[in-house]
Image (cartoon, grey):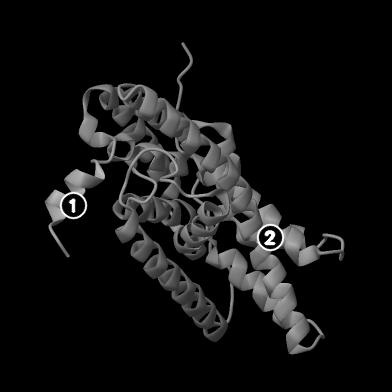
């Protein structure tokens, strides 16, 4: 009988060689932008609470909030590629205004990829809200399905391919250098953004049962994304998180506390009685 050896994907080195000053400046900028995005997200979450569906948000407002959330959750993990590419833009023989335009193209392309996924997220939340409103018990199975799908994605080939892309930024930057000049920076940002979507969409859909504006859940997902991409043992973490999601999928139909994002919000009159007069 053949001996089967099961091992996680070989760890890779996500870092790239940059001068310390450039690396420190790039990380500082990314962290500042992420912190600002977190402040805006937390401030908005305090006024919205959690309930099934889109929480009454129109699509344009939802997408605006979604982009801010993605900036908060994704920028730290995308920093190695972004910093190196932006550093290359700054060395091009062009004026400051032109270089700033190229940097804006790169960032816009990356956020454009996540905006496209935001459209799908809005549709999924709208459908979820309608189902839970019509049948509150359906929330348990929607939550179980979301956890199951997220768990299976952690072990799937799409996750493996996209995570390998995100963990090897130098290889990808060499590939991007061969892109045609037309809207090059926009296409590079969008291309890398699509790989990030492919790597992380399973982690994002757990916000449906956990709550779209659940700050603690968002922070936990952001930490997992960061460690998966930049920690040397990230591939093992991917498997551990996948197992955890499968366990949650089995528990969700019987444990309502695992599904705060699929519970009906209390009526406004009850909320007023709980909070009292302002």
- Give the residue at x 29% y 36%: 264
Could you tell whether 104 is left or right of 248 in the image? right
- In this rendering, the answer to whether 154 lies above or below 2 is below
Is any part of residue 254 visible from this angle? Answer: yes
- In this rendering, the answer to whether 167 lies above or below 52 is below
Helix, strand or loop under label 1: helix
Q: Nearer the viewer, mark 2 or mark 1?
A: 1
Could you tell whether 136 is left or right of 201 in the image? left
The image quadrant that residue 123 belongs to is top right
The image quadrant that residue 107 belongs to is bottom right
Question: Which label is found at residue 272?
Answer: 1
- In this rendering, the answer to whether 131 lies above or below 63 is above
Q: Nearer the viewer, residue 18 or 27?
A: 27
Image coordinates for residue 94, horizontal then vertical, percent: 81, 85
- Density class for disc 2 (Cα within 10 Å; few <14, some 14-19, many ≥20) is many
- Give the residue at x 64% y 49%: 194
Q: Earlier in the sequence, mark 2 or mark 1?
A: 2
Q: Nearer the viewer, residue 92 or 123?
A: 123
């Amino acid at each position: 009988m053949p001996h089967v050896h099961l091992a996680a994907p070989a760890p890779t080195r996500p870092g790239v060689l940059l001068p310390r000053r450039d690396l420190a400046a790039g990380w500082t900028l990314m962290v500042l932008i992420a912190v600002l995005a977190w402040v805006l997200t937390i401030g908005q979450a305090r006024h919205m609470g959690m309930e099934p569906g889109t929480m009454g948000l129109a699509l344009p407002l939802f997408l605006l909030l979604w982009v801010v959330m993605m900036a908060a959750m994704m920028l730290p993990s995308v920093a190695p590629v972004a910093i190196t590419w932006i550093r290359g833009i700054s060395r091009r023989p062009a004026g400051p205004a032109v270089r700033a335009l190229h940097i804006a193209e790169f960032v816009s392309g990356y956020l454009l990829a996540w905006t496209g996924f935001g459209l799908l997220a809005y549709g999924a939340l709208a459908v979820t809200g309608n189902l839970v409103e019509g049948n509150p018990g359906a929330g348990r199975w929607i939550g179980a399905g979301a956890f199951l799908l997220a768990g299976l994605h952690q072990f799937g080939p799409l996750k493996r391919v996209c995570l390998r892309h995100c963990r090897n930024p130098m290889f990808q930057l060499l590939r991007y250098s061969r892109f045609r000049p037309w809207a090059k920076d926009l296409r590079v940002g969008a291309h890398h953004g699509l790989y990030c979507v492919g790597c992380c969409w399973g982690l994002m859909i757990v916000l449906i049962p956990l709550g779209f504006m659940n700050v603690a859940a968002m922070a936990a997902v952001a930490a997992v994304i960061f460690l998966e991409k930049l920690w040397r043992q990230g591939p093992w973490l991917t498997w551990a998180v996948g197992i955890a999601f499968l366990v949650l999928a089995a528990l969700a139909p019987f444990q309502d506390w695992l599904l705060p994002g699929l519970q009906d919000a209390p009526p406004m009159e009850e909320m007023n009685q709980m909070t009292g007069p302002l």
